[in-house]
Image: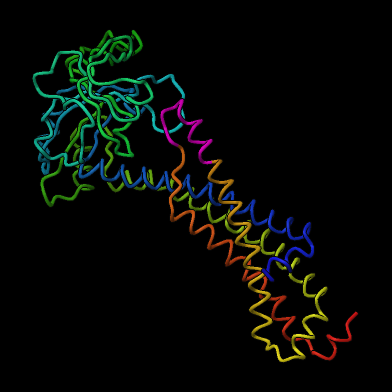
């Protein structure tokens, strides 16, 4: 109670100091929740990529450029290749705009990975695709794409003007499959060509066209060396290995990490200077009081402890308010992301606790200098202070 009473002596000044810390912690919570979401996607994407080497057209375009399916056999013959198969992988609506992961359609022949894909796909309802589905308009949907479209097993889902019967819905994976629609390869090939420019599609045959070759190396083979051999053996292709994929998506996480550090430094400077100013003025106003405490036997350590505790309470209050406002911002942001089917933030207990600890420690550290100065006051001089 004494701490709160001391802080209440100058309510406006204390409130302004708390506001400075609140703003910094609010930003720290929001960016921290965003970074946590990105980190989760990076970790999940690494697990999803696994041991694969992805071969695509050197023309680029993220699956917009076709490859002849004949290259699959040539890829399989490259030294170090265990399994190779072709697939269609492209955005469902390449002209659309959305926040987060783009919705993709994946066309493949079930079982073509020969058991090498060990990503833990689990089904919330329905079943997986089977070889007998080839040539039929059936689809398995990721959790997010199913949720935002309100689709259930047995329902109909439209992709590029074609209606599909939903036979399975995946459980959330927190990574790429959540926004993917899996269908038989031959069906995906037809849809892919249908959406290409006429001058391109007229030169292609659907059943002979893919966008990617998925390659699994033989156990123990060096993926980077295999990727180099594939690029040398196949015309006009480029490859992506797991390590290159990690570097690519990891750069996003590193960028967010840098932003978090920047926000932390800003909150450190703004909040810290506010606390230093408040505590310095408080010490100045309570010089006689401090002198009396020293005269009746109060130790320097006790004076320091009391003032540092006051500064810590200021930091804690600012942290609590900042955390509350940050949680509201995260909830609003995630609600706004509902239209895109993507939760933008992940606020964890660890992020919340770290923010409160940071705010409290910030206050205590910033209050140490004025506290030490107060403890060094000569009791006699302090008692004479007016």
* Span highlighted in magenta in the image: 330-343
Of 245 and 237, which appears nearest the observer? 245
Task: Classify residue 249 by image quadrant.
Answer: top left
Of 56 and 127, which appears nearest the observer? 127
Q: Which residue occupies 38% across, 19% down?
A: 93
Q: How many marks?
A: 0
Q: Position of residue 358 (x, y in %)?
A: 55, 62
Q: Which residue occupies 56% across, 41% down?
A: 329
- Report whether 172 appears left or right of 364: left
Colouring scheme applied when the structure was drawn: rainbow
Q: Position of residue 338 (x, y in %)?
A: 45, 29
Task: Classify residue 287 by image quadrant.
Answer: bottom right
Residue 333 on the magenta segment: yes
Residue 193 on the magenta segment: no
- Report whether 83 appears left or right of 364: left
Q: Main secondary structure of the magenta part?
A: helix
Using the rendered image of the protein, determine whether residue 126 is visible from the camera's viewpoint: yes
Q: Position of residue 305 (x, y in %)?
A: 63, 79
User: Outermost residue, front direction?
Assistant: 1
- Report whether 359 appears left or right of 226: right
Against 301, residue 228 (above or below) is above
């Amino acid at each position: 109670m004494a701490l709160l009473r001391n802080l209440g002596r100058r309510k406006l000044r204390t409130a302004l100091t708390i506001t400075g810390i609140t703003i910094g912690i609010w930003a720290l919570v929001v960016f921290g929740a965003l970074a946590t979401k990105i980190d989760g996607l990076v970790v999940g994407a690494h697990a999803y990529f696994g041991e694969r080497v992805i071969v695509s057209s050197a023309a680029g375009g993220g699956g917009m450029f076709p490859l002849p399916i004949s290259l699959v056999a040539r890829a399989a013959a490259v030294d170090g290749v265990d399994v190779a198969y072709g697939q269609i992988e492209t955005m469902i609506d390449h002209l659309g705009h959305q926040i987060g992961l783009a919705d993709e359609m994946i066309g493949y022949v079930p079982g073509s990975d020969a058991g090498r894909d060990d990503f833990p796909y689990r089904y919330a309802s329905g079943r997986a695709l089977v070889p007998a589905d080839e040539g039929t308009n059936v689809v398995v949907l990721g959790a997010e794409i199913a949720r935002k479209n309100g689709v259930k097993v047995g329902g109909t889902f439209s992709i590029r003007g074609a209606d599909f019967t939903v036979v399975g819905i995946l459980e959330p994976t927190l990574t790429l499959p959540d926004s993917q629609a899996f269908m038989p390869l031959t069906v995906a090939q037809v849809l892919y060509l249908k959406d290409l420019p006429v001058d391109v599609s007229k030169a292609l045959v659907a059943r002979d066209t893919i966008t990617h070759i998925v390659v699994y190396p033989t156990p123990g083979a060096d993926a980077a060396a295999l990727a180099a051999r594939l690029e040398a053996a196949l015309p006009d292709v480029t490859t992506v290995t797991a390590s290159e994929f990690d570097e690519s998506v990891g750069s996003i996480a590193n960028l967010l990490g840098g932003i978090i550090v920047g926000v932390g430094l800003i909150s450190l400077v703004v909040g810290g200077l506010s606390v230093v100013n408040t505590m310095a003025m408080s010490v100045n106003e309570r010089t006689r009081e401090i002198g009396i405490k020293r005269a009746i036997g109060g130790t320097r350590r006790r004076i320091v402890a009391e003032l540092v505790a006051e500064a810590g309470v200021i930091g804690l209050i600012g942290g609590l308010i900042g955390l509350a406002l940050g949680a509201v911002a995260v909830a609003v942001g995630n609600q706004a992301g509902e239209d895109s089917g993507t939760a933008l933030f992940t606020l964890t207990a660890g992020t919340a606790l770290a923010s409160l600890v940071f705010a409290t420690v910030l206050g205590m550290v910033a209050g140490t200098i004025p506290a030490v100065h107060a403890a060094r006051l000569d009791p006699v001089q302090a008692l004479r202070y007016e």
